[in-house]
Image (cartoon, rainbow, N blue to C red):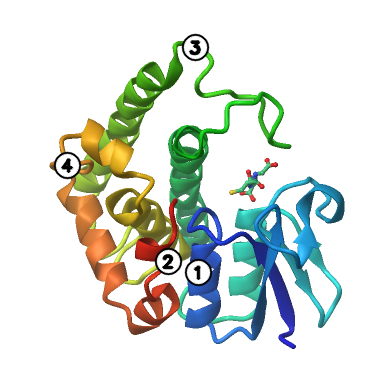
Amino acid sequence: MGKVDIVYIPIVGRGLQINIICAMHGIDANFLMSKPMGEDFDKDTEAPFGTIPFLKDHSNGIELNDSLAIVQYLVTKYPGPLTPKSPENASLTAMYWSWAQDYYSFVLSPFHDIITGNNDPFWRNLRLTDTLAEGGKETGVSNLTVLHKKRIQYIENHLKKMNMNKYVTGDECSYADIFIYTCVQTVLETGGFSILREACNGEPFKGCHNLMEICNNVGKIPKVIEAVGSKFKDCPI
Ligand SMILES: N[C@@H](CCC(=O)N[C@@H](CS)C(=O)NCC(=O)O)C(=O)O
């Protein structure tokens, strides 16, 4: 049994980046699956905020129920290549992570509801949104595609202005790069997101050379390749 339990569900979502970070830092982790897509854990009754990811570290008993808190804990408690080297780097990394978090929350996650056909208000613990309520699937996809383009344009313009090197904070990969990579690859590769690829005429990141460069660099890291395996092809979202 690993020292650290990490609970998620079998999608890319907000889980794969944590698996990658564990692989890069050599963290001995049990990857458990929550209901409704697994039987190891019940997020509704066992996670304090009713969401996943959830972490329990058996070495000290700490329980964390937020992906940024989990990742910051892992890279601080178990230092490795993704541990920020200065307060400035730590803050910038958290900021770029939050770009990905917002993109995930407001673009990718509402797309999940369209892809999986979930349109009941309150089916989630975290938000009320029924993506399909205001005009059905076509309007939902069209609105979210506008938002996708806006969000990626902001990050791309910013990276260009900052003369970004290999990764968002410089020459070294950060945990923010890992989350940006999993979000971008989800859109590019998973079956469910063909809906967004089609809405963008097959080029969801058209002109985003800086963003794509980061993802190419992350995708070449051997531990990333190992932790990802065929997940982008196998997972629906
Ligand atoms: N801020 C939280 C958001 C967690 C979250 O929304 N998780 C989703 C899965 S990615 C979830 O548990 N949704 C099910 C629900 O809301 O009931 C984090 O980053 O961990």
Q: Residue furthest front?
A: 117
For label 1, the crowd category at 10 Å Cα-Cα, with few meaning under 14, some 14 to 19 and many 20 or more, is: many
Residue identifier under label 1: 84
Q: Nearer the viewer, mark 2 or mark 4?
A: 4
Q: Residue furthest top?
A: 135
Residue identifier under label 4: 202
Residue identifier under label 3: 134
Q: Give the alpha-carbon distance from disc 2 to disc 1, as whole Å.
A: 7 Å
Give the vertical position of 82 relative to 140 (above or below).
Answer: below
Give the vertical position of 18 relative to 137 (above or below).
Answer: below
Q: Provide the secondary structure element on which disc 4 rests.
A: loop
Q: Give the alpha-carbon distance from disc 1 to disc 4, as whole Å.
A: 36 Å
What's the mark number on residue 24? none
Q: Earlier in the sequence, mark 2 or mark 3?
A: 3
Q: Give the alpha-carbon distance from disc 2 to disc 4, as whole Å.
A: 29 Å
Q: Earlier in the sequence, mark 3 or mark 4?
A: 3
**Residue type at tag 4:** Gly
Q: Give the alpha-carbon distance from disc 1 to disc 3, as whole Å.
A: 43 Å
Residue 53 picture location, percent across and down: 66, 57
